[in-house]
Image: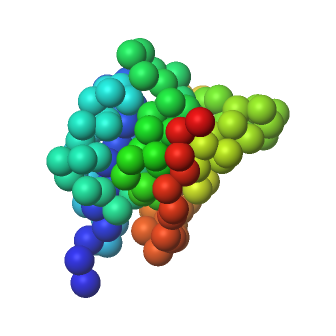
Amino acid sequence: MPKIKVLLVEDSPVAINIYEKMLNSSPHIEVIGKASNGEEGLNLVFQLSPDVICTDLQMPQMDGLEFTKQVMAHYPTPILVLSNSVQKADVDNIYEVMKAGAVDVMAKPQTALGGNTESMQNQLVVKIRVLATKKVAVIPLI
């Protein structure tokens, strides 16, 4: 069975390394590209054809919301938004990214605060495996 190809779009090198380690721990998932902002991410989407994209919301040049809109307009791919801006209280942010075409959201791991990384890793792997089975449609830019 081919591995699920994941593109990571995140401006924090520390977060990218954590996500990559978590995802590569699964025999079903392979991180095929990493970008530090939405512009880089968009170029990699076209080059690499990932099965699933994980993106942050706050990034320089092009943020995660605009990146999601561009991906869904030009190259629809299931997107998981991994961000500090999608905690339960961030209803507006969650609504906006879901409306833009993201399939799921997940709050960034609070590992520095003694968070359970194993539980986070399992949750992330499960979300990626589920998203890889989803078909998404073009959402035209308005």
Residue drawn at point x = 65 percent, y = 29 percent: 85
Residue 102 at x, y percent in the picture: 57, 49
Check the image and name the residue furthest to the left.
47
Q: Between 117 and 39, which is closer to the camera in this rendering?
A: 39
- Does 58 sit above or below residue 83? above
The answer to whether 27 appears left or right of 56 in the picture is: left
Quadrant of the frame with the N terminus = bottom left
Residue 46: x and y in percent read 24, 47
> Foreground: 121 or 82?
82
- Residue 108: % across, % down: 56, 37
Q: Residue at x 25, y 56 (%)?
A: 49
The residue under the point 42% across, 22% down is 62
Compare residues 36 and 141 and report the one nearer the observer: 141
How is the protein colored in the picture?
A: rainbow
Q: Is residue 139 left or right of residue 50?
A: right
Q: Residue at x 28, y 61 (%)?
A: 5
| Front residue of this view, candidates 109 and 61 | 61
- Residue projecting furthest to the top: 60
The correct choice, above or below, for 101 with respect to 84 in the image is below
In the visual, does 25 lie left or right of 121?
left
Please tell me in which quadrant of the rendered image residue 142 appears.
top right
Position of 127 with respect to 76 (left or right) is: right
